[in-house]
Image (cartoon, rainbow, N blue to C red):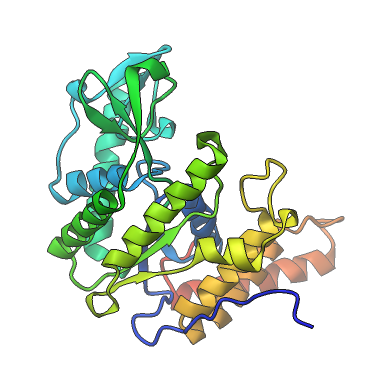
Amino acid sequence: MVLSTNIPLSRRKHNLINYNSNILLLGSCFSENIGAKLAYHKFKTLENPFGILFHPKAIENLILKSVNSETYTEDDIFLHNERWHCFEAHSTLSSTNKEELLSNLNLAVNQTSTAIQNASHIIITLGTAWIYREIVTDSIVANCHKVPQKKFLKEILSVTEISESLEAIVALIKSINSKASIIFTVSPVRHIKDGFMENQRSKSHLLTAIHNIVEPRQNSFYFPSYEIMMDELRDYRFYAEDMIHPNKTAINYIWEKFTSVWFDENSFTTMKEVDTIQKGIQHKPFNPNSEAHQQFFKKLQQKKETLIKAFPHITF
């Protein structure tokens, strides 16, 4: 008796991820889960330079500014609760110092521009179709920064609006990098603060829009993170205590599925070597001065040197 369902996945044949790949990750907090896995295994990555971005319009705006190398000025930021913020970025970039925020924003623009130009793979994770529009400026924000909700209108992007936004994202990327593989996915994080039915409606808009625009012949693809969580891991034991975010087991499971589709076979050997070194670094000896530990440390250093010689970008 089979008590679970498995989503059929086909391994990619071209432009697979390896240790020479340059990977840019943008989008919702689930992109940070995958980004953390890539960083742990020492792949070349840049993850959310503007912080977490939940909806496609925010990601489109970031890419537009980066491709055009636009500069943020004092007109783009505001003071609220004794901190300077930008409606186009996550609060992780906010600061008590105005100049520091502007520096953070413009650094993020430059980093993203360079990453897009050099990327072999761009992974974009969409979290929600719900957006907030600032009433005074009639502009969509990426983050409200705890500004009173009465100053915003809450709306849901239509499938057409999302499709147009994703088409713009692809066109902008291709305008400076025609070779990058663009991988879209939908975050399995449940946005139930919007409401249970509203969350499902939002996810359905995102899924439909993505499938309207992905075209493997044009190097744009879809990976079913959301479906794996919903259909293969359909049990609350795979959620964190908040019952909203996937737990470590679920993240590891989806990561394994992703690597099985997108990773070059030779990368797995290097990943195991990196994992061995990472665990060795984290090891805490009972007696650091013992001969056994000194031998262990020497072998660990030799493994590091061998790996770094093969892949100079790797640091521990």
Residue at image position (68%, 40%) is 242
Q: Nearer the viewer, residue 139 or 311?
A: 139
Q: Is residue 203 visible?
A: yes
Q: Give the x, y percent position of residue 241.
A: 72, 43
Q: Is residue 122 visible?
A: no
Q: Nearer the viewer, residue 134 or 16?
A: 134
Is 114 placed left or right of 189 in the picture?
A: left
Quarter in which the C terminus is drawn: bottom right
Is 160 placed left or right of 204 in the picture?
A: left
Is 227 placed left or right of 186 in the picture?
A: right
Q: Give the x, y percent position of residue 104.
A: 32, 34
Q: Nearer the viewer, residue 263 or 240?
A: 240
Q: Count up the numbered dots.
A: 0
Q: Give the x, y percent position of residue 211.
A: 34, 66
Depicted 19 relative to depicted 204: above or below: below
Quarter in which the N terminus is drawn: bottom right
Furthest toward the front, the residue is 197
Residue at image position (62%, 45%) is 244
Depicted 203 relative to depicted 315: above or below: above
Q: Give the x, y percent position of residue 47.
A: 41, 52
Q: Nearer the viewer, residue 67 or 282?
A: 67
Residue at image position (41%, 24%) is 145
Q: Residue 311 sits in which quadrant?
A: bottom left
Q: Residue 272 sits in which quadrant?
A: bottom right
Residue at image position (35%, 41%) is 50
Depicted 187 relative to depicted 182: above or below: above
Q: Residue 185 sits in which quadrant?
A: bottom left
